[in-house]
Image (cartoon, helix red, strand yellow):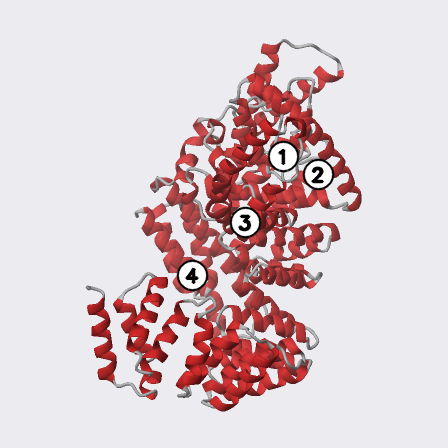
Amino acid sequence: MKPNQIEQTSDHALKFTLNGELKKAIDTTGLLADELQWGEITDRLSEIRDNYQLMLQYFMQGVDDPERRRIFNKLTGKLLQINILLREELLLRNTTAFEYTQKRFYPHKLHFSSATDLLDSLKYYHNKKRRTIDEEVALSVSETARIRQNYERLLPDLFLTFWLSTVIGQAERTVYRQLLQPGYPGTTEQCLVVSALTMNLWRMFDEEKVMLLIEACENDNSMIRQRALVGLCFVLVRYNSYLPYFPALRNRLMLLADNNRILDNLINIVLLIAGSSDTDRITRKMKEEILPEMMKLSPMIKNKLESEAQSKPDEWSEENPEWNEMLEQSGLGEKLQELTNLQLEGADVYMSTFAVLKNFSFFNEISNWFMPFDPEFSSIGELFGNKDQSLMTAFLNNSVICNSDKYSFALSVMQMPASQREMMSHSFKAEADQLAEITRDESLLKPNLADKNIARQYIQDLYRFFRLHPQHTEFSDMFAHSLKIHETTFFDILAAASDLKEQLAEYCFTKSFYEPAIDLYKELIKGSEPSAALNQKLGFAYQKLGNIDEALAAYLKADLIQPDDLWTVRKIALCYRTKGDFEKALEHYRHVDFLKPGVLSTRMQLAKCFIALENFADALQIYAQLEKNYPDELKIERATGWCAFIAGNLHQAEFYFEKVISSVPNAVDYLNAGHIALCLKKRTEALDFYKKSLALQSSGPELLAEQLEADRIYLVKNGLTLDDIHLFLDAYTYSLTR
């Protein structure tokens, strides 16, 4: 089989399995087993087939077996695992995809003979390091570098072993558990092994591996625990449809959620994962709006600085208020403020900044994308080797920048001349002290802040990998379903013991992720007391997606629960108007006007409803009242003129459009003035108005023909014939050639 045939056959088998069509699933999986020719797998598949046929035999004999569903689910789970194993082994033999190419060759690149040997080598480094410190044993620079280099060579080996192994054997499980022991001194390898296991599960589901990941979720070390919990969330979203067939795993998850601290961690992680959906929008905003504006503004500010340096040397430190004016005029100030607000909310605002700094050879090693920031790492250790630790302090205390970006920045600083690095280090000193103070204060006010920061940084590290790694397109995107997490069994487990559903609904709503917000609000409405607010938000989300019927239904329910709410009644009126039911819209706008009389926008909407119902007299009466209350209001004069025109009151229409044209007319104003002049047989005036309208739209005769056709019903109503329109268009076209 070719790789695409293997994947298609496996996908079909999985589909049949999850749909409960076990015979088709067994037969299709058999095609893969025949291709692989692995006796053990073939025997396991035959056992499943025999047990299923026996179950069917009892079913046909009318035996009432209370265990039938449990047995069926167990067989389904076993079949899923066999299918996954067959797919993995066949792709390993046949595909050139990045992951499987790595898997074929990694055993030949390892620097150890067994998993136990790997663990002993890692321990040797830490013991040597501890003895050097405790016993004050002085090692030569070359010896220290050699020991460190040997240690760093083992880290990719550790990652590859747990990322690419098909089965985590007994020796590997022992190493895994010893690495995660409380007394183990190497945080870097602890974090790496959890990330590697997560990536292994992302490629292929395995119940035993998920159980190992859950063990790490209960670790006392926050660095380990947060990474494991993040990985678990992603894995359970990917394999949500598998959970019903692995009851032991489901029970283990329920026990995990019983731990209040872990539950709080998971709620935070779910919200952070949902928030990652906003990263692409923020990155686009940075690239397309903020950075181009800053580039445009930079020369202006530079010129100001140079002129002030010459004219006011004694006031050099005084900021120029004109800079703020420049920001406001360019619109950049508002965008930067939005960016600041997003950063305060924990949004990933640095993706675009550091995306260009992932080309260092450091990132050629896949494990380095997942490493916690380590200032002792040989690639960057020179930055942190001197006595002045201000740069290191600033880095380690900076909870905003993720580990991957810290490495990017440090590696770019390493390329600077030593003098420039020294200057940068000194400039960090004050900020380092300030960051340390802020961190202390935040830790006192928010005890769980450290957990949240670790989780957020790790999610951003993962995001960098799945968006920026040179082979990222060969991986299934971990973030493709960030807004689908609420559809999972795991989410239901978490939501049953918390207000997670409400929190995620509010987050999605405020970030304009309306589709998941709708799903969540519908569930909340179904499971709670009648709530006007929930129905209002549901209606608004439907409205923003253009689903007016559903929006109206939700608004009407909100109105039943909380009658006479001004906002709700206005939205109901808007929905009816959008649907074209102007009688109902008029009824509800009248109710809005009753609840809050005399509001300009409401009165204008009432008039529009009257116009749609061809009740021009009442519409003009409203406009007349508004004109008394709001003299010289352009939009009232514009609306009155148009209403008079379509009502056939040409001279009244002309009067109002003369006022509009003498103010600040737009293209539509000139167009409507042209219509009126044309109907009054003032054709030269009409020609002039139409030319001005088209000039504002940078268009020609074709557009005018379309606009006259669009308004033909009103032109004919005011006395024009089709011949008049055609003759005028020809005259207009000839006028352009004179």
Cα distance, mark 2 to mark 1? 10 Å
Q: Nearer the viewer, mark 3 or mark 1?
A: 3
Residue receiving disc 2: 221
For marks 3 and 2, the one nearer the N-term is: 2
Quadrant containing the C terminus in the rendered view: bottom left
Q: Residues within 10 Å of mark 3 (few under 14, many from 20)?
A: few
| Callout 3–callout 1 Cβ contact below 8 Å | no
Q: Residue furthest right?
A: 444
Tell me the residue that label 4 is attached to: 15
Pointer 1: what residue? 190
Give amino acid for label 3.
Answer: Gln
- Amino acid residing under circle 4: Lys
The mark that comes first in sequence, 4 or 1, is: 4
Pointer 2 local density, CA inside 10 Å: few below 14, some 14–19, many at least 20: some
- Does dot 3 land on a helix, a strand or a loop? helix
**Alpha-carbon distance for marks 3 and 1?**
51 Å
Q: Is residue 635 above or below residue 479?
A: below
